[in-house]
Amino acid sequence: MKKLLIASSLFLLFFTSNAQIDKIAGGLAFSSGVDFNSNSTGNPGVFGKAYVGVVKRLHLVPSIVVFTTGEAGSTLGSSNIRKNYMFHGDLDFQYSLFREDMLTLVGFTGLNMTGIISKVDENTTLENVSKVNPGINLGAAVEMNVDNSFDAVLSAKYIVSEFDQLIISLGVIYRFDSRKRRGW
């Protein structure tokens, strides 16, 4: 396991040593939800991504998603209130599979860390709990050229972990280098 970790670290270091952030993205994310501590997580979430160019069609994409609070229970007299807060951190390799005129089809896979914090009212038998689980992402996205600096993006990914879920995201990508139309 140590050798695999060292080899993958050297691989990332080698390919990203001259890399820089090409573009950033932000938008809304919608989750199929996770049941945790007798409550579900909330929707929508807000995401942020940075795209680091590795080679011509490959990007390393770290991202973070923060979801709104999932809340359940009675609000009268604040008895038995349960709130779940969910966060995602991802590190994906994204590869441009196909481009046709103004659309680009992208596939990606990577690592995920999902954290859920559950807060409960003191008038219940449930306890405050938090948990962080690793997982694997697998997904695809469609990017649409809006102008030389902006793209719209629609993506779907499935997270395989103890917190299995489908995430659909809609957002905007900003390119630091206003591009001229170029080929592969």
Image: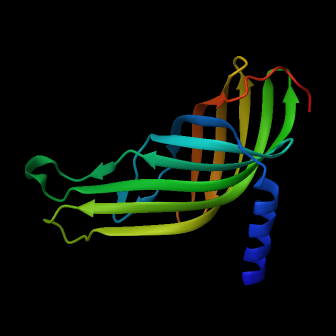
Residue 129 drawn at (x, y percent):
33, 69
Which is nearer the eye, 71 or 50? 50
Residue furthest to the top in view is 147
> Is residue 170 toward the left or the right of residue 16 in the image?
left
- Observer able to see residue 1: no
Q: Compared with residue 83, is residue 145 higher up or lower down, i.e. above or below?
A: above
Q: Quadrant of the C terminus?
A: top right
In this image, 93 relative to 112: left or right?
Answer: right
Q: In x, y percent, where is residue 167? A: 58, 46
Query: Total of numbered circles in the picture?
Result: 0
User: Image quadrant for the N terminus?
Assistant: bottom right
Q: Residue at x 76, y 48 (%)?
A: 19
Q: Quadrant of residue 159?
A: bottom right
Place of residue 169 in the rendered image (x, y in percent of width and height, measured from the top left) = 58, 38
- Left or right: 156 with respect to 93? left
Say left or right for 159 vs 97: left
Residue appearing at x 26%, y 71% in the figure: 127
- Residue occupying image coordinates x 34% and y 48%: 69
Asked whether residue 106 appears in the rendered view, the answer is yes
* Visual colour scheme: rainbow
Query: Is 125 located above or below residue 3 in the figure?
Result: above
Residue 114 locus on image (x, y percent) = 51, 60
- Report which quarter residue 4 is drawn in: bottom right
